[in-house]
Image (cartoon, rainbow, N blue to C red):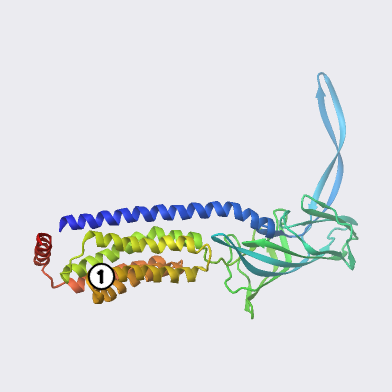
């Protein structure tokens, strides 16, 4: 009996090593693809976009006397010093539509999106003098494409737009207390996240409103972002609003795009957890065969372990070509067919279809299926382990293990003598 347990343990250990190698291979293959494909997706769809608020300021100059010493001679020079005085935007009405469009490359899904941006700003000259006010508009990212771009100052569209380092710089002249409207619109596309940033040079935000419309229901606010003040469900997703009358800066508004289940990392997680699945199956099979006095040779365990391994091996390469759910279904059927058809020859139809077939369905198929629910897989596996322990304890509670092992030894010796 001890030799048999050691042989089964050796088979389990060898299969576990094979699973670790397969899982590591899938992980490396996925990471290599991600490095290469993410750049390709970024070139086609852009990267994460961070739209900064319109920056408004005016400049003042003054002459200062600078003293420099060259040897014994002191030289006085007059230099002009320029100071930027930042002005809070008097009112902001921003509306953004985020249109999610998942794209798959290799073993990975990427959360690409289209964005329609409309920014309406009210600029006020709060000083008692006529000022030439500067407007700086920052594009979210320099590598993206901006279609249907429009820059309006009052009722006039700015035609001759000069862009330097991803910034549009315009100037308007405002009389004391004069107010002017500025509107900026564009269509673009990005990846994973979209942000609205008030910027480091803005100390106060007045009369601010941002409305975000999504075509997806699974909303996620990234770390360091704030939740909306109002939420409303729509037919396609959500209408979210951030509205503040007088806000200190230092906050950001962000939206993380929903992510699809990525085949590569998902297969890797299942594969690396497979030894737990096989251990539970071997444990239950060993108990069943011991109690029922069914003699199964360690080589039979070896072929069963190989059939379990075939599930993950086929899954690792099948998800490259068809959907993840169809791949899972095909691999489950193949592995169960291998085990049941083989054990039918070893222990008979009833034991193969009932004890072995049901156990494999639970400990391979259902065990692996829990990984579709990313946040609940650990809990599901824990519950499965506890239920297995409960079933085995109830099934064997009245057994005299010493007598059972002696009977198994006698059966094995009689078989070997024949």
Q: Residue furthest bottom?
A: 235
In this rendering, the count of numbered labels is: 1
Q: Residue 73, located in which quarter of the rendered image?
A: top right
409 to the left or right of 186:
left
What secondary structure is found at the residue carrying circle 1?
helix
Nearest the eye: 222 or 200? 222
Q: Residue 131, located in which quarter of the rendered image?
A: bottom right
Image quadrant occupied by the C terminus: bottom left
Q: Is residue 380 visible?
A: no
240 to the left or right of 167:
left
Image quadrant occupied by the N terminus: bottom left
What residue is shown with label 1? 345
Q: Residue at x 48, y 64 (%)?
A: 318
Q: Residue at x 29, y 57 (%)?
A: 12
Q: x%, y% of residue 177?
A: 87, 63
Graded by Cα atoms within 10 Å as few (under 14), some (14 to 19) or many (20 or more), the crowding at tag 1 reads few
Q: Residue furthest top?
A: 72
Nearest the eye: 380 or 354? 354
Q: x%, y% of residue 129?
A: 89, 56
Q: x%, y% of residue 170?
A: 85, 56
Nearest the eye: 176 or 314? 314
Q: Is residue 144 above or below residue 80?
A: below
Q: x%, y% of residue 260?
A: 55, 67
Nearest the eye: 393 or 408? 408
Q: Is residue 394 visible?
A: yes
Q: Residue 216, located in which quarter of the rendered image?
A: bottom right
Q: Residue furthest front?
A: 418
Q: Residue at x 11, y 65 (%)?
A: 411
Q: Residue at x 77, y 49 (%)?
A: 165
């Amino acid at each position: 009996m001890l030799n048999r347990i050691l042989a089964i343990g050796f088979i389990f250990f060898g299969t576990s090593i094979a699973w670790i190698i397969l899982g590591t291979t899938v992980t490396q293959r996925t990471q290599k693809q991600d490095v290469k494909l993410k750049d390709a997706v970024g070139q086609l769809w852009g990267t994460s976009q961070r739209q900064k608020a319109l920056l408004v300021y005016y400049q003042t100059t003054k002459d200062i006397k600078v003293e420099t010493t060259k040897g014994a001679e002191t030289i006085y020079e007059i230099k002009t010093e320029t100071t930027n005085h930042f002005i809070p935007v008097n009112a902001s009405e921003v509306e953004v539509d985020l249109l999610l469009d998942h794209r798959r490359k290799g073993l990975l899904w990427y959360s690409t999106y289209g964005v329609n941006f409309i920014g309406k700003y009210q600029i006020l000259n709060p000083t008692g003098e006529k000022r030439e006010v500067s407007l700086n508009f920052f594009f979210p990212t320099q590598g993206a494409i901006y279609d249907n771009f429009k820059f309006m100052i009052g009722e006039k569209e700015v035609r001759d737009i000069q862009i330097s380092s991803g910034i549009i710089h315009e100037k308007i002249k405002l009389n004391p207390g004069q107010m002017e409207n500025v509107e900026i619109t564009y269509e673009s596309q990005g990846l994973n996240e979209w942000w609205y940033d008030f910027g480091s040079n803005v100390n106060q935000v007045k009369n601010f409103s941002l409305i975000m419309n999504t075509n997806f229901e699974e909303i996620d606010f990234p770390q360091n972002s704030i939740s909306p003040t109002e939420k409303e469900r729509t037919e396609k997703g959500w209408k979210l609003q951030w509205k503040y009358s007088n806000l200190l800066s230092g906050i950001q508004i962000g939206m993380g795009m929903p992510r699809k289940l990525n085949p590569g990392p998902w297969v890797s997680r299942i594969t690396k957890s497979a030894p737990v699945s096989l251990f539970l199956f071997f444990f239950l099979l060993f108990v069943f065969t011991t109690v029922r006095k069914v003699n199964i040779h360690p080589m039979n365990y070896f072929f069963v372990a190989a059939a379990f391994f075939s599930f993950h091996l086929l899954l690792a390469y099948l998800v490259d070509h068809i959907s993840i759910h169809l791949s899972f279904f095909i691999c489950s059927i193949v592995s169960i067919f291998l085990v049941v058809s083989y054990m039918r020859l070893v222990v008979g139809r009833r034991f193969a279809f009932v004890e072995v077939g049901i156990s494999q369905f639970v400990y391979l198929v259902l065990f692996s299926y829990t990984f579709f629910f990313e946040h609940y897989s650990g809990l599901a596996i824990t519950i499965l382990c506890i239920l297995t322990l409960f079933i085995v304890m109830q099934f064997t509670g009245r057994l005299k293990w010493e007598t059972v092992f002696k009977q198994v030894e006698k059966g094995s010796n009689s078989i070997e003598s024949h």
